Image: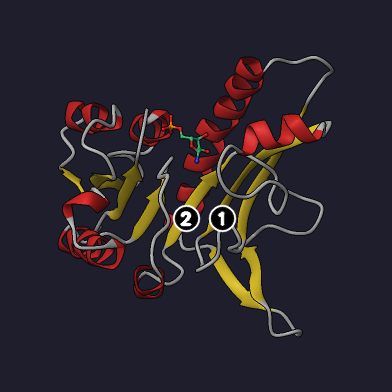
Amino acid sequence: MTPFRLGVLVSGEGSNLQAVLDSLHGRDGIEVACVAASRPDAPALARARAAGVPTGVFAASDHPGRAARDEALAEFLTAHGVDLVVLAGFMELLDSAFVRHFDGRVINVHPSLLPAFPGLRAIEQALDYGVRVTGVTIHFVDEGIDTGPIVAQEAIELPYALDIARVEERVHAVEHRLLPEAIRLIAGGTVRIETAESGARRRVTIEGERRGER
Ligand code: GRF
């Protein structure tokens, strides 16, 4: 059976990449085909190399502009035969041409319950706002900022006076479980983005999942 190939995009630490490598790479017909970083000093690159996964660095400053960078990135992912692009702490926007090229084949992990707190520093935004519940969202990437169809979400309750380091720890623990779970579902071919009667194309259905059940 041909493996389902992931291209993982990173900018920093790479703890989500590590979770994907540990729980999915080389198992159940899934493999991490390549890892691309937006910065040459991303610690995530060492994690990819340690797992024997090919890496590339695509810093915007090495290209005439973001469109050219994203084109080179798309070529790298295509050359590695990627079926799904996973943004795992990729801290830069991808241009519309990239998103259209990989339409429905790019997902992102975001540390809030979207649509609350999109963009950067989502955990700080949630704490500053004073919400009692936050969480993690895995969503398909569209041309907006953290606006694409939602594949999976999990809530985390925030007790009073919880410091940011402890919230981050809890958010990361959920991310490290939810991201591989969502990838496994997509790789299994059971995830579809459907068009609602209103015309909105953002309802994600997972075969076998019924309302009220997980
Ligand atoms: C994660 O919290 C992710 O949700 C956010 O950036 C962080 C990346 O962490 N987009 P890591 O690089 O995977 O450790």
Q: CA distance from mark 1 to mark 2?
A: 5 Å
- Expressed as whole percent of the image width and height from the top left, the position of residue 189 reads 46, 63
- Expressed as whole percent of the image width and height from the top left, the position of residue 108 reads 49, 51
- Expressed as whole percent of the image width and height from the top left, the position of residue 211 reads 79, 58
Residue 195 left/right relative to 47: right
Q: Give the secondary structure at mark 1.
A: strand
The answer to which of 149 and 211 lies nearer the viewer is: 149
Q: Which mark is residue 107?
A: 2
Residue depicted at 28% across the width and 27% down the height: 43
Q: Residues within 10 Å of mark 2 (few under 14, many from 20)?
A: many
Circles 1 and 2: CB atoms closer than 8 Å: yes
Residue depicted at 47% across the width and 55% down the height: 107
Is 40 above or below relative to 139? above
Q: Give the secondary structure at mark 2.
A: strand
- Expressed as whole percent of the image width and height from the top left, the position of residue 161 reads 80, 14
Quadrant in which residue 126 is drawn: top right
Residue 195 left/right relative to 161: left
Q: Earlier in the sequence, mark 1 or mark 2?
A: 2
Q: Residues within 10 Å of mark 1 (few under 14, many from 20)?
A: many
Q: Residue under circle 1?
A: 139
Residue 132 left/right relative to 15: right
